[in-house]
Image (cartoon, rainbow, N blue to C red):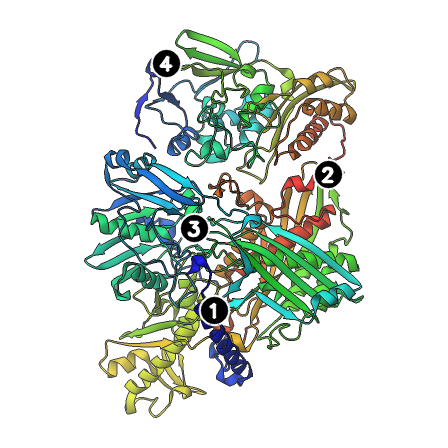
Amino acid sequence: MTPFSYVRAADADAAVRHSGVDAKYLGGGTNLVDLMRETIERPGTLVDVTGLSAEITETDGGGLLIGAAVRNTALAEHGLVRRRYPMLARAIVAGASPQIRNMATVAGNILQRTRCAYFYDRAGSRCNKREPGQGCDAIDGFNRMHAILGASPACVATHPSDMCVALAALDATVHLSGADGERRLPFADLHRLPGDEPDRDTVLQPGDLITAVELPPLPIAARSTYRKVRDRSSYAFALVSVAAALSVENGTVTDVRLALGGVAHKPWRASKAEQALCGQPATEATFRAAAAAELAAAEPLRDNAFKVELAQRTMVAVLGELAEVEVLGGGA
Amino acid sequence: MSGEGKGIVDKGKEAVQGVAQTVMKKAVELAPDSLMPGGRPDPLIRRQHGHIGKPVSRVDGPRKVRGAAPFAAEVALDGMAYASLAYSTIAKGRIAAIDTAAAEAAPGVVLVMTHRNAPRLNPPPRFLSGDKAAAGDDSPIMQDDRVRWNGEPVALVLAETQEQADHARSLIRITYEEEPAATTVATADGCEVGTFMGEPLRAVVGDADAALAAAPHKVEVVYRTPGHNHNAIEPHAATLAWRGDELFVHDATQAVAHTAWSMAQIFGLEESQVHVSSPFVGGGFGAKGLWQHQVLAAAAARLAGRPVRIALSREGVYRIVGGRSPTEQRVALGADADGRLTAIIHRGVTPKTRHSPMPEPFILPTQSAYASETIALEVKTCYLDMVANTFMRAPGEAVGTVALECAMDELAEQLGMDPIELRIRNEPEKDPISGRPFSSRNIVAAYRAGAERFGWDRRSPTPRARREGEWLVGMGCATATYPYHRMPGGAARITLDAQGRARVDVAAHEMGMGTATAQAQVAADRLGLPLEAVTVRYGDSSLPGVILAGGSQQTASVGLSVMMAHQELVAELLKLAGNDSPLAGLSANEVESADGGLRKLDEPGHFESYASILGRAGRGELAAEGSAPMPLETMHWSMHSHGAMFCEVRVNAVTGETRVSRFLGSFDCGRILNPKTAASQFRGGIIMGLGLALMEETQFDERKGRIMNRNLADYHVPVHMDVPEIDVIWTDIPDPRAPMGARGIGEIGITGTGAAVANAIHNATGRRVRDFPITLDQLL
């Protein structure tokens, strides 16, 4: 770890004032401290923002405003989250371990970085995300965990968060405080695809501070779920995950929210599948066609071709569960 | 030299040794039983109602729960500096330049050591190359600019704190001249038949290839297992100091005596100048031997004139401590219409380095598994530039049983036979290769008991017959096996005090398995004392014995050593007792230990307590030391433990996820000394076997020879939710040839488990997965 100075911010304005060129905001530290230990991140200053908003408040109209410093565990356990946005509660508890969730904050979870092993191996591997222009050792290396959608020749990393997959499906909004004051950003626009700037995970500018995440009132989300597929029962990143909310009336899909995790550089809103579902009969055939539409653009790598099939199967199973339509298991 | 292949002189020596060994072997095989260790069964086998067999809680438990058991990285020494290692990032070549200026100028730095300023050291003695050789790797340690594997230590920083050392280490800049490295079997630097303990890993009985060709039923399959890395909960560590020319090492090791001797060789010292203590070890599994970190720390301590603590990071363990090599195994079984095996072929390839003690000996479990007219076994090993491979829980058996026992399941399916009945039908009457009689073999009883308890009769022989919602449910079984070992060098001392209490001193190891507890139980029975009157001192190279906590042999080695010490003690006691004792005139073989003293066999009235004997002689204490004889019993009998492993899995038909829902291990390991600690050992082995089956895999990037998943987030081992209730039962039939009737139990749990899981997955899904681990993508 590289030596650094530490300040604790009293409020958002103070935090933004403290943020300099080489400053980093510190939430629970469950990812940032690891990155500092590996010398991937070498901030000169850590601005501790865990003392900032840790409230969850109901907005007019029945949405929720979630303070950036709310711990993951607190969010997952919140009664309104569990009732109105069950996919979010389930996504959070599907992630990490109880100890990590007790520490991790909402904003920290959103801004965590990829777990690509080549990104982490500063001493021995090339990575464009870590050192722009250096090259990518993952594209022809171990890439079982890597992206099948939206990747670029520069980077095939995935975003590791479970919580963010639900936020992407739920049309959340991010509240920001920055050098030019406060602003809001659709959550779906926060994270970037890698393109030729994979070192930029998000569109945030230096000094930008996430102060809150807002969930809109979304009745459809009361009937929603999150399903995560992984290599062991707990404490493993998603190979594929699906966040879904579905509304069916008289056998027809009237509304749907669908997002995927483990497949791309950002939480992947499955817009193509949503389009293919709306107004169609809630049948297995529809679900399969929608899943296939979403994955049509998939470009698998050496080790992750199975994700293309796995993502479709998991989407169909989740939609079937929400629609209470029996779907045959996968390749059965 | 090891690096350049064997010279003619070495080959000649080996040939002479080979002839001598063959003659010796024959003589031992033909000798009368009574001349062998175990020829007269240990009298403790007959003794019931003692401490042996009681579920005594571990004696070190309270200290560990309170955090009061100091591990190697927790021992604090005055003036201690902290070490941090920099590792190479190429697989082969030389260091062209190394810039340590920034590191040396960093806060708190005491010194930076590289090949340029490291003290001159002798090569580390490779494990198995001598009685007390301990090194897992005999490469020179920071002696030149050569790089031999990706991850080799190239610099060490000493600083006032661990954080300062780690930071300074990150400032070292190294330029390499890279050379082409052998990182795949296809580009290996030579291949040959492997050897293990000096013998070729090859066995031939009859013409197996011809028998296979002629067999009416046959399976020919290739199974692959990946590399595995060691992940004991305690990463390797040592805290050490020089006092003059003497070196004191607080180590985490499963070989205190070996380490002391080997460190002495490396530093050019007398063995008596090195003191190694290791009272608590947070898991060994074969990895806690002598690696570069202890040597580098001692070298740096000498340079700095200060005590040093070195605690490897998890990455450090991956970089410098070897693991289990990958294997590619071909198993071919030929059988007649009744399912009797006519051919067993088990051949394959596994990589190793020129500097490691042995290749992964995956044919070992096949050597005594089944009767067959013909057998052909061979391990071919290919030399790579990688971190030295090493011993990992049941080397050979853990992955060898994967191929053999899955192939047996495949044969049973083809024959339409129950897989248990197929195994029982092929039970050998004597060792199928050596022809030696079995000391004790109750595998059929273990299968029968396990099948009944597990509900094997509810298994459908037809795959994919049971489905619950998305989940396909299946059952499988496989045989577990591990040999009884006892290595030369066992010795122990018993000291009685004036109150008649006993202390056993033995250079053994407590790595979490319950050694101190079980040995106190055995010693209490041996001496006829209550458990509270016996203490066991262990984990220090100053104590008697050269005893490795490896090969599941420590219990036998210590047990026999204590038995020999007890014989000496009884003789001494009778001498001390003299003519005024009720024991007067009795010889050692006319008395036994009981009730805190000696009594005449069959005439318990002739008795005198230890306290009385010592008191009358005016002795404050009486010590006796004994040495175990050479372990000839394993050359006279075929001695093996077995287990019948039963697994139930649920495989998700949508996602391919496998969840083990039930597991039962039914063991035949001789007498169980402590059911509580034994059950833990069995379960721990099985859990490790579940990891082997479903998730453990070293990601070795062949482009650079670099291990990529060098942490517990990326290298998966089972978490609690992956582990179901594990039932363990045992026959508890004593082995008449083993001390206490007990064969080792530390490793057998991991054997057979992988195959039981794979066979259950086949029963659930109809899929045969032959590439381990069995990940969900193979079941989609």
Mark 2: secondary structure? loop
- Which one is closest to the eye, mark 4 or mark 2? 4
Q: Quadrant of the N terminus of chain B?
A: bottom left
* Amino acid identity at mark 2: Gly
Task: Name the residue located 58 percent from the left edge and 15 percent from the top edge.
Answer: A171
* Amino acid identity at mark 4: Val
- Which one is closest to the eye, mark 3 or mark 2? 3
Categorize mark 4 by other alpha carbons within 10 Å: few (<14), some (14-19), many (20+). many
Distance, label 1 to label 2, CA atoms, is 63 Å
- Which one is closest to the eye, mark 1 or mark 2? 1
Q: Are marks 4 and 2 on the same chain?
A: no
For mark 2, what is the residue? B469
Distance, label 3 to label 2, CA atoms, is 45 Å
Would residue B344 be found to the left or right of residue A198 on screen? right
For mark 1, what is the residue? B11
Categorize mark 2 by other alpha carbons within 10 Å: few (<14), some (14-19), many (20+). few
For mark 3, what is the residue? B321
